[in-house]
Every structure is written in structure tokens, then in C-alpha cells.
Amino acid sequence: MELNAKAGVPPHLRYAWWLTWGARAGMALLLAGFVAYVTGLVGPHVPIERVPELWHRPASELLREIGLRPGWGWAELVHRSDMMMLAGIALLASCSAACLAAVAPLFLARGERAFAAICVVEILVLLLAASGVLATH
């Protein structure tokens, strides 16, 4: 499917296209991480034997115990199988921002500035939330 504004692609189809591929990529990363984890092909950051002892702890205590910084600290360990699965979850969670960025130019091309502005504001809110700036530790 051609996805440029001149082709007259409706925004909902472009959004759906980006959402489909983002979800597929996120699921593929989740699956790859899971296979690497259960087969032992790639070792986890947290050994599976420790998970039951850590699971009940508050997030701040758990992070301290496993040696992770709050926020995006896990991203530097994406080469570990458990963090690879977390990357898949993060990709799935960020799909909507990519979809909104893809449709905003279509709204502008159609003269629908209010919809384009809403897309931009939603993206900014998602980025702000993901940044951790508002988090209380």
C-alpha cells in the first residue's frame, strides 16, 4: 500500500499500517527474547531462580537489588534475554506515538490542522510520560 499524502491515503489506514507493523515488531522481539530466555541461548540479567524471591518487593527495592537504575536503565542491558522481552513491551507501548507521527502530516495535507495538533500534543504527552521526568522516586 502506498502511504504518502498525495496518494490520498486516509489517515486511519496509515495509522492501521503503522500499528500493524509496530505490533508485529514488538511481538517478534517479545518472542525472540522469550525463546532466548527459556532455551538459555542468551542469559537473563536476573536468573529465573531469583524471580520468586524478588517478585513481591516494591519496585524501588527490586531495582536496587538487581542493580538497575529507575526509568530507562534497563535499555543498556537489552542484550540480556529478560531485558529483550522488556524492550518488546516498550516497543508495543510506543506504537501509538509512531502511528500518530505518521498521520499528522496527512491531517496537515488535508487542511485538518486541529487533528494534526492533537496528534502532536498526544505525542508530546507520551514522550513526557516515557521520559520519567514526572516520576516520583
Image (cartoon, helix red, strand yellow):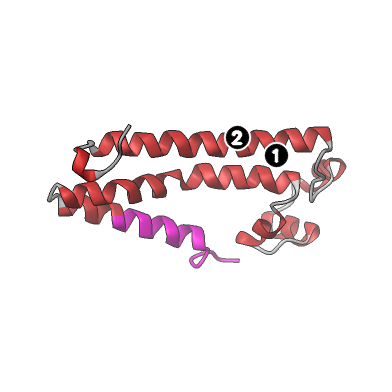
Q: Amino acid at mark 2?
A: Ala
Q: Horizontally, is 72 left or right of 57 in the view?
A: left
Give the x, y percent position of residue 128.
44, 62
Q: Residue at x 78, y 61 (%)?
A: 67
Q: Are marks 1 and 2 in contact (CB under 8 Å)?
A: no
**Foreground residue among 55 and 81:** 81
Find disc 2 in the rendering and name its residue. Answer: 28
Look at the image and say whether residue 94 sits in the magenta stretch. Answer: no
Q: CA distance from mark 1 to mark 2?
A: 8 Å
Q: Residue reaching furthest right?
A: 49
Q: Residue at x 79, y 33 (%)?
A: 38
Q: How far from the left and from the top, in percent, is residue 29?
A: 62, 39
Instruction: Name the secondary structure under disc 1.
Output: helix
Picture quarter with the C terminus: bottom right
Q: Which mark is residue 33?
A: 1
**Where is residue 93 shown, x and y percent of the image?**
50, 45
Give residue 7's position: percent from left, percent from top: 21, 38
User: What residue is rendered at 73% in x and 51% in y?
Assistant: 79
Which of the image's four quarters has the N terminus?
top left
Q: Residue at x 40, y 48 (%)?
A: 98
- The quarter holding residue 4 reads top left
The span shown in magenta is 120-137
How would you rate the neighbour count of disc 1 (Cα within 10 Å): few for under 14, some for 14-19, many for 20 or more? Answer: many
User: Mark 1: which amino acid?
Assistant: Gly
